[in-house]
Structures are given as C-alpha cells and as structure tokens.
Amino acid sequence: MKLEPIVISAETHRGANAEYGRFLQGDILRLLPTLIEQYEGQVKLIYMDPPFQTGDKFTMRVRVGEEDWRRGRGSLTLPAFSDTLSREEYYDMMRQVLIGCKALLRDDGMLFLHVDYRTSARLRLLLDEVFGEENFLNEIIWAYQTGGRTRRYFSRKHDVIFFYRKTDRYDFNLEEVMVKPDAPKNNHMKRHVDPDGRVYRSMKVGGKVYTYYDDDPVAPSDVWNDLSHLQQRDPERTGYDTQKPLSLLIRIVRCGSRADELVFDPFCGSGTALAAAQYTGRRFLGVDQSPLVPNILRRRLMQFSYEMALQPSPNAPECDANLSAGVGFYEIQLNGVQFPEGSLPPSVSQWDAIDAWAAGYIVDGAFQCAAEARRSQRAPQLLNRLNVPVYSGQLALAIYDVMGGQHYYQIRPSEFNLS
Ligand SMILES: C[S@@+](CC[C@H](N)C(=O)[O-])C[C@H]1O[C@@H](n2cnc3c(N)ncnc32)[C@H](O)[C@@H]1O
C-alpha cells in the first residue's frame, strides 16, 4: 500500500531526549540566536574545526547499494561542503561564531579552535579580541606524518589548536589525559630500582630528595605528536573529508569537561567530537550544514541516544509498504520506493537509492526511531522487514536516501488487513 508522506523536522534515536545528545542541521549563523536562547551559559567545552580557507569544494564518495557495500567502496561522489567564502566573509562569520560561542560557555568553560597555517594568525587575533588575551592558554601543535611531502618547502605536518578559557575560574581536567612517559632520558639523576622492580630516579635539591618513577604517567605538553592522523584505510574513516581522529577529540573532551557536562561543536562534520563526547559520557550538541552529515551520524552514533533537528529534504519518493501484526509487535515490510523522475543519478536504481530506513512512532512531532535497517560491509543487503513493538501513537516509517535526504510517512494500521 502507498504510504502518506508527512512533514517531520526532528528524530530521536535510542529513546533519547534532547537533553543527552542533539544535532542540528543548518547554518551556524542562523542557528546561534536560538542556541543562545536555549543554552546560554550551559556549555562546558566547545571544540570547533571550521573550514580552513582552502578554497576547495569538498566531496564525499558514498556507498550505494549492495555492490558498493560488498566491495567496501563508494561509487557516487556527492558535494559535502564548500570552503569558498571570501576572506572577509569568512572572518566575519568566525567573529560572529566566536562571540556566540562565548555566550554559550559556562564561566568555568573552555574553547578549542582547530586551524592550520592558512588562518591561524588572524584567528588568534580574533580570539584575543573576543575572549581577551588574558584568557589564552595554549597554542597546541598537533603533529602527524600522514599525507604527501614536498621538496619546495618544509612539508606542512601540523595543525594548530588554540585553547582559551572563558574566565580564570575554568575547570581544566588534566588528570584525565595523562600519558605514558617517553623512554627515560639519559639524565643526570641517580637511577634506583624499588623492591617491586620499578625504576625511579632521584635528585637532591636544597637538602630535599625528589624521586620520579620512569613509568609514572606524565601530563602532555602543548606539542601533541603521539596522536596519529587517520590512515588511508583507517577503520575509523567515515568517508567525510577533513574528519579528525577520535583519539584527538577524546583528549580534548576529557581535559575540557567532566561526565554529563555539555560539549558543543558548531562545525561537527562527521561528528568526531560528538562521538568522543558520547564515548566519554558527556552530553553533546552539534551543528553542521552539510546534507551528508545526518546519514554519517546515524551510523556513527548508532549505540547512543540523541535527537536530530533536520532540514526538509527535496524529492520525497513514493513509498510502498505492508503492515502485519505479530504478538505485541508490528511487522513492516518495505516493498519499494519511487523517486521522482530525474531526481536520482542515472547510475542509481530506486532500491539502491535507500541508504537505510527505519520504523517508529511520531512522538511530540518527532520521529522516534524504534527499528532501523541499514547496510554494512558484513551485511550488504538491505533488510526489507522490520519489527516494531506496538505502542499507542502514530506509527511511521522513515526513508534515508543516499543523497542525504530523509523522508517520513505515516502508517495507519486501520487501513491494513491485520487479521
Ligand atoms: C573541517 S570540517 C569539520 C570536520 C569534523 N571536525 C570531523 O571530524 O569530521 C568543517 C565543517 O563545517 C561545516 N560548515 C561550514 N560552514 C558552516 C556553517 N556556516 N554552518 C554550519 N556548518 C558549517 C562543513 O559542512 C564541514 O562539515
């Protein structure tokens, strides 16, 4: 039976409420006033990794259908985001974002701004202007070895992460990011071995003896060369260009926040900061305007609770499904979809245009996902049946297309023969 499309602009996953994790799709400048209304003075940590003024248009290779999933490679290239603002537009946007972000921070909160050589000079000045020079804490050098090398100048193998506090009451959690010490230096301290076999060094200064164990954890300095960038075939890769490694974000999230506190990323891309927040038991708030981000987050945040506020998607397909009743559950069978003529790339068939689909209920105007079918490399075929428990409320189905669109339909059990 053909299902009736409905307009929905929010989704919840894993029974989430927006209190725990929240993603908003859209332009950060447009969303900031609402965010300030809702979250002023509540965010503990902001990490932001804005475009770097590369002048590039970034694309993503998306896996389409069983064949792509089986061979683990995407065959459809889609625009992800453009980094083509003029210098004036860019710095004007960044000024407004930084001012808004400062308003969102708690007094004990912090901001990490990730940049590279292209924008670091001007953004450092802008940060000083917005946060105050006295609130500058670090210029962190994140050094890595990946990527090609040039012989025309020294290869650029580091990014810069500026670290600012909102006030001098900031709550820096260094204990959570201690690291294993490097191999002990051949220093001039006396070497000892304690009864447990642990090596330590000692030094007498002013009549007092100081001891240091070789294996005592140490605090990282402002040069981070122990966290590698993603490799070409890194399992962590989502396919989103400019994705940062989870280990980097986990360090930032751990030192800048504590359990249950709110972490915000206004340019969240593939959601690395959101994943790091969830992994470490923090709440998150993320914004991005790319149409490809919601599908990535649905895969990446799969085990977690979160809400998404989404933009309407064009080209809703017709959706044909059947409903049958089990004991305490409905079985929904997706028979097929029909996207409007000309809305799919010629190489993509109707069924392959479905990246994933879900069934659930409409609760307070949001689609509450109860069951999802999505492809994976191990199970490249898309399931066409899902079971959802019988609750009261409006039963609904969602189609997520490979171009990043999400489309919703209501299912009226009374219209099916459920005997
Ligand atoms: C460098 S990427 C972030 C990558 C991310 N840190 C990750 O690990 O995947 C920058 C992101 O900013 C987003 N973006 C650019 N301008 C934006 C704007 N005005 N509002 C919201 N998002 C924006 C882009 O869509 C892109 O995903």
Image (cartoon, rainbow, N blue to C red):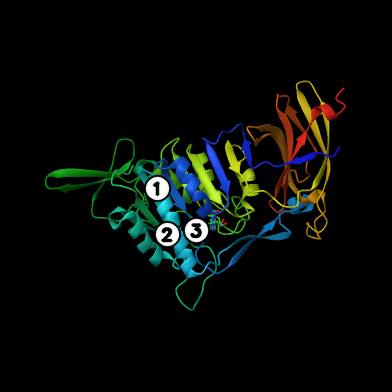
Q: Earlier in the sequence, mark 2 or mark 1?
A: 2
Q: Earlier in the sequence, mark 3 or mark 1?
A: 3
> Cβ–Cβ below 8 Å for labels 2 and 1?
no
Q: Quadrant of residue 171?
A: top left
What residue is shown at x 81% (from left), y 25% (from top)?
325
The residue identified by callout 2 is 95
Judge whether residue 397 can be spotted in this image: yes
The residue identified by callout 1 is 103
Nearer the observer, disc 3 or disc 1?
1
Judge whether residue 158 can be spotted in this image: no
- The relative height of residue 133 versus residue 104 in the rendered view (above or below) is below
The residue identified by callout 3 is 50
The residue carrying mark 2 has its beta carbon less than 8 Å from ligand 1: no
For marks 3 and 2, give the CA distance: 12 Å
Q: Earlier in the sequence, mark 3 or mark 2?
A: 3
Label 2: how many Cα within 10 Å (few below 14, some 14–19, many 20+): some
